[in-house]
Image: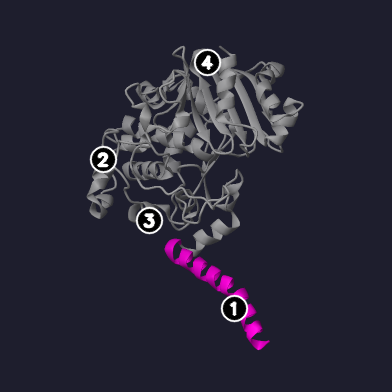
Amino acid sequence: MKNLIKVIKVVLITPVVLLVIFVLALCLKYSPTYVYRLATMNVADVYDYQKFENRKIEGSTDTFKFVKMLDENYVENLFQDRVDQSGFGSFDEWAEKSQTTALIFIRKDTLLYEKYFNGFSRESYFHSQSMAKSFISFLIGAAINDGLITSIDDPMTKYIPELKERDPDFEKITIKNLLEMRSGLKYFTGYIPGTYIHLPWHAEAVGYYHPNVRKLLLKKVVIDREPGKSFQYNNYNTSYLGLIIERATNKTVSEYLEEKLWSEIMAYDALFSIDSKRSGFEYMPSRLIARAIDYARFGRLFLYNGNWNGEQVISENWVTESTREKKDMPRNIYPDWFGGDNCKHVYYTYQWWGHANCDSTFQFMASGNLGQNIYVIPDKEIIIVHCGNSLEHYGDFDLWNVADKLR
């Protein structure tokens, strides 16, 4: 009987001991803060910014406002296919169940639709998720315009020389490689089997929850394959771009974003979450927080080739290079779901996504997880902003379907 009790104790205690050892190992490798964040937050959502320190970015005194001429039935009918596909009886039911938080539709500077759902309003903060990448790309262009970065063909080591000391091959990675997600940096993307939950060493989780991302970039990230030869969506690329901006401008990314964009065109203030008070490094790939109508303003800036009511905020050339498909880019470097060599396909440029159509028209967008989109249809002068907190009943291709309906 005593032996049986001992066996039961061992069976019960062993998993606890192993778990403690596992947690301690993670703490040593990444930090206790990382493990705490991973355990308490795990799957990212649009309220995460409330759990991080945030830098405030002040808005503009700009008086431009979109003309309001609402046509709500027209816009909601454009989404009827999505409503039907989801099996809902009405647009309002779809908006609620899809966890849509904002939908804005602007045509030729005229606001046809602006509605907020699920407890959100115009004054609410909307988490950008990976739409932030397009803002970081904007800042690279601004720094080039300001003469602070020489060229996208510069090696990243020109601005982060410590990397060359750690591995000389970092010198082969250019700013352009980072912009196009073709750097060759190692990026592990494993999940717990049978779930969509990141493994504790998933690179996205490590970057998202780490309390010192700058140190992670300088000391831990390694090269996996030859730069420029393949595409992999990799958040480290955007974080390195942010570090280059910080080094080139001698300012925080929040300060430079306020100077070059927010103080120029935005109606409201914004927030940018940092990794920790001590480190003070913005999480460049996804934790910019702003109002939905200001996301529309960013879309308008790029729709009109960087010109804001007569002022060239960013060069027209940068807008073109950032959002138009590179026809000489080999299609076989992209995943199959990009559409291969079909005339209708997805493309990726300088931290912007694109949809190419068979009639030679195209759309481009800033896109983020959980349903964040700034979707620009240039030939129709249309901007659509969608924000949400789920991908169960909404996806980027829904806006492509809307664009097709407008043809």
Say few, some or many: other residues with alpha carbon within 10 Å of mark 2 (under 14 / 14 to 19 / 20 or more): some
Judging from the image, the colouring scheme is one colour
Residue that mark 1 sits on: 10
The N terminus sits in image quarter: bottom right
Pointer 3 and pointer 4: residues touching (CB < 8 Å)?
A: no
Q: Nearer the viewer, residue 41 or 58?
A: 41
Whether residue 4 appears in magenta in the rendering, the answer is yes
Dividing the picture into quadrants, the one containing residue 77 is top right
Where residue 319 sits: x, y (%)? 40, 24
**Residue that sits furthest to the right in the current view:** 89
Say few, some or many: other residues with alpha carbon within 10 Å of mark 3 (under 14 / 14 to 19 / 20 or more): few
Secondary structure, mark 4, is loop
Q: Which mark is residue 215?
A: 3
The C terminus sits in image quarter: top right
* Amino acid type at mark 3: Lys
Residue 360 appears in the figure: yes
Secondary structure, mark 1, is helix
Q: Which residues are magenta?
A: 1-30
Pointer 1 and pointer 4: residues touching (CB < 8 Å)?
A: no
Q: Mark 4 or mark 3, which is nearer the start of the sequence?
A: 3
Dividing the picture into quadrants, the one containing residue 225 is top left
* Amino acid type at mark 4: Glu
Q: Which mark is residue 155?
A: 2
Horizontal placement of 247 versus 2: left or right? left
Q: Mark 1 or mark 3, which is nearer the start of the sequence?
A: 1
Circle 3 or circle 1, nearest the eye: 1
Whether residue 5 appears in magenta in the rendering, the answer is yes
Circle 1 or circle 4, nearest the eye: 1
Say few, some or many: other residues with alpha carbon within 10 Å of mark 4 (under 14 / 14 to 19 / 20 or more): some
Q: Nearer the viewer, residue 187 or 340?
A: 340
Q: Residue at x 45, y 33 (%)?
A: 134
